[in-house]
Image (cartoon, rainbow, N blue to C red):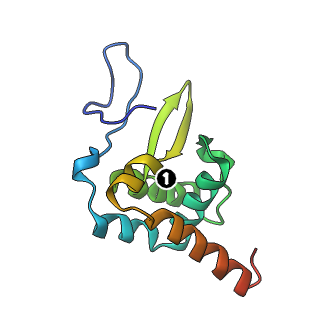
Amino acid sequence: MPTDTTSPRTSSGSRSLEHPARADIRLADVLHALADPMRLRIVCALAAAEGELNCADIELPVSKSTCTHHFRVLREHGVIQQFYRGTAKMNGLRRDDLDELFPGLIDDVLRGAELQARRLGEG
């Protein structure tokens, strides 16, 4: 998966997306991104997949434009990486980066989300 990109098109003409470098990821930004229920649902789906998922593979009960917004917030705050494979926008959790910067955070968030879903009868 690509990490940092600075232009919307590479020399070959393919599209790329900007991501913060590992050193630029801040805890407050990650927590902000994870605070929204839809974004947390995306992160849980990506963690469960243990790999890449297309945006359409993650069903959210919101409009397409709102989905796009949530994925963008997660990418811009360093939680996920996005890249194009053909016309599909693929997503992956930046697990290695987040574990290096904030050890245990993602595991605890995922565990908390699972416990909440059970408690509320959603899981």
The quarter of the picture where the C terminus appears is bottom right
Q: In the visual, does 34 lie left or right of 57?
A: left
- Mark count: 1
Q: In the visual, does 69 lie left or right of 19?
A: right
Q: In this view, does 71 lie above or below 7?
A: below
- Pick whichever, 89 or 109, lies toward us: 109
Q: Which residue is drawn at 46% across and 40% down?
A: 82
Give the quarter of the image for residue 62: bottom right
Name the amino acid type tagged 1.
Thr
Q: In the visual, does 69 lie left or right of 110?
A: left
Q: Residue at x 47, y 59 (%)?
A: 70
- Pick whichever, 112 or 10, lies toward us: 112
Residue 67, horizontal then vertical, whole percent: 54, 57
- Pick whichever, 101 or 25, lies toward us: 101
Residue 2, horizontal then vertical, whole percent: 40, 31
Secondary element under disc 1, as helix, strand or loop, is helix
Q: Mark 1 points at which residue?
A: 68
What crowding class fits label 1: few (fewer than 14 Cα within 10 Å), some (14-19), or many (20 or more)? few
Residue 92, horizontal then vertical, whole percent: 52, 44
Residue 63, horizontal then vertical, whole percent: 59, 60
Q: Which residue is drawn at 25% across and 33% down?
A: 6
Give the quarter of the image for residue 69: bottom left
Q: In this view, does 86 lie above or below 79?
A: above
Q: Is residue 38 above or below residue 83?
A: below
